[in-house]
Image: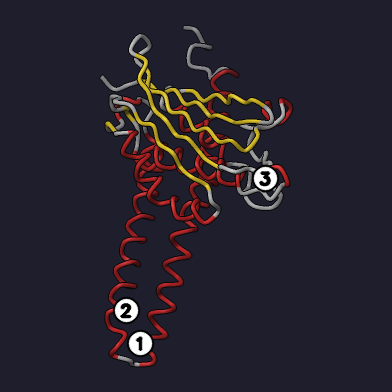
């Protein structure tokens, strides 16, 4: 009998360690995502309690609205936790439901559009007819929103060059490459791009170009999620002009 047959190899240990490390990074990002609705829940609850203590019946509609918002936010947290559990358990992308990437982009734009317009940044969409992909909607939403937020931070920088920029815009587009059976999403901003040195580090965990905001996990988590969908992400940069993140994900046919 071969005593080494069932013996774990160093390769298996490395894979296990990499998976644990990746899940740890993902968990850190998800905790950040959960913190936002939880904070909103706390604020809505505190405001509602104040109204109740005042015993002002005129505020009944306000209280009902706040309580409904608490319910909605709680459901969002539950959904994030549920998706995280499924992400940990599943290894095959065929197990993921089919999702409409174009619809996810439209919803993300709706969520962020007001914030962008406040900084005079325009979100332009150029969405082609594409097939669905296998992905969890929560993760796909996180990919789109994080890439848009990344562009927002780049364009809202108060550098002299950006202050002179007449049009600040983010173009998010999709297309389908039939020969490769791939769906492509491109998120491009005209913030001036980054140097080659920064480009090499951009997907490393905890690396960030922001002065104080962010923990540097955003792009590394995006890369992790995309790779879990058998996809890949590239960054195309023309320094002084633009940055364009290109995401390639297999189509669900």
Classed neighbour count for the residue bearing mark 3: other residues with Cα under 10 Å, few (<14), some (14–19), many (≥20): few
> Residue tagged by mark 2?
63
Taking 75 as reference, is 215 left or right?
A: right
Image point (49%, 7%), residue name? 2
Quadrant hosting residue 249: top left
Image point (65%, 32%), residue name? 193
Q: Position of residue 181 (x, y in %)?
A: 34, 15
**Disc 1, disc 2: CB below 8 Å?**
yes
Quadrant hosting residue 11: top right
Q: Secondary structure at mark 1?
A: helix
Q: From mark 1 to mark 2, how far is it between C-alphas?
A: 8 Å
Q: Secondary structure at mark 2?
A: helix
Q: From mark 3 to mark 2, how far is it between C-alphas?
A: 45 Å
Of residues 74 and 238, the one nearer the viewer is 238
Q: Position of residue 106 (x, y in %)?
A: 35, 42
Image point (72%, 47%), residue name? 159
Q: Earlier in the sequence, mark 1 or mark 3?
A: 1
**Residue sitting farthest toward the top:** 1
Of badges 3 and 2, the one in the foreground is 3
Q: Earlier in the sequence, mark 3 or mark 2?
A: 2
Q: Which mark is residue 147?
A: none
Q: Secondary structure at mark 3?
A: loop
Q: Position of residue 76 (x, y in %)?
A: 35, 55
Classify 152 as above or below 175: below
Q: Which mark is residue 52?
A: 1
Taking 17 as reference, is 35 left or right?
A: left
Q: From mark 1 to mark 3, how far is it between C-alphas?
A: 50 Å
**Residue sitting farthest toward the bottom:** 55
Q: Which mark is residue 164?
A: 3
Image point (52%, 40%), residue name? 169
Of residues 56 and 105, the one nearer the viewer is 105
């Amino acid at each position: 009998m071969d005593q080494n047959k069932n013996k774990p190899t160093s390769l298996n240990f490395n894979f296990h360690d990499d998976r644990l490390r990746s899940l740890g990074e993902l968990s850190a990002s998800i905790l950040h995502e959960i913190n936002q609705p939880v904070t909103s829940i706390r604020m809505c609850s505190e405001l509602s309690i104040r109204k109740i203590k005042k015993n002002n019946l005129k505020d009944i509609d306000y209280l009902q609205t706040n309580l409904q918002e608490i319910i909605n936010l709680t459901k969002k947290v539950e959904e994030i936790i549920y998706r995280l559990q499924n992400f940990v358990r599943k290894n095959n992308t065929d197990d993921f439901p089919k999702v409409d990437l174009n619809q996810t982009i439209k919803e993300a734009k709706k969520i962020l559009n007001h914030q962008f317009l406040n900084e005079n940044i325009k979100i332009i969409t150029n969405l082609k007819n594409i097939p669905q992909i296998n992905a969890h909607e929560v993760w796909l939403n996180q990919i789109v929103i994080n890439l848009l937020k990344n562009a927002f931070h780049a364009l809202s920088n108060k550098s002299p060059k950006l202050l002179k920029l007449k049009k600040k815009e983010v173009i998010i587009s999709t297309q389908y490459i039939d020969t490769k059976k791939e769906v492509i999403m491109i998120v491009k901003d005209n913030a001036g791009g980054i140097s080659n040195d920064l480009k090499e580090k951009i997907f490393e965990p905890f690396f960030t170009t922001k002065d104080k905001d962010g923990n540097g996990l955003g792009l590394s988590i995006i890369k992790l999620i995309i790779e879990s969908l058998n996809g890949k992400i590239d960054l195309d940069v023309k320094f002084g002009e633009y940055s364009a993140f290109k995401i390639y994900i297999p189509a669900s046919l």
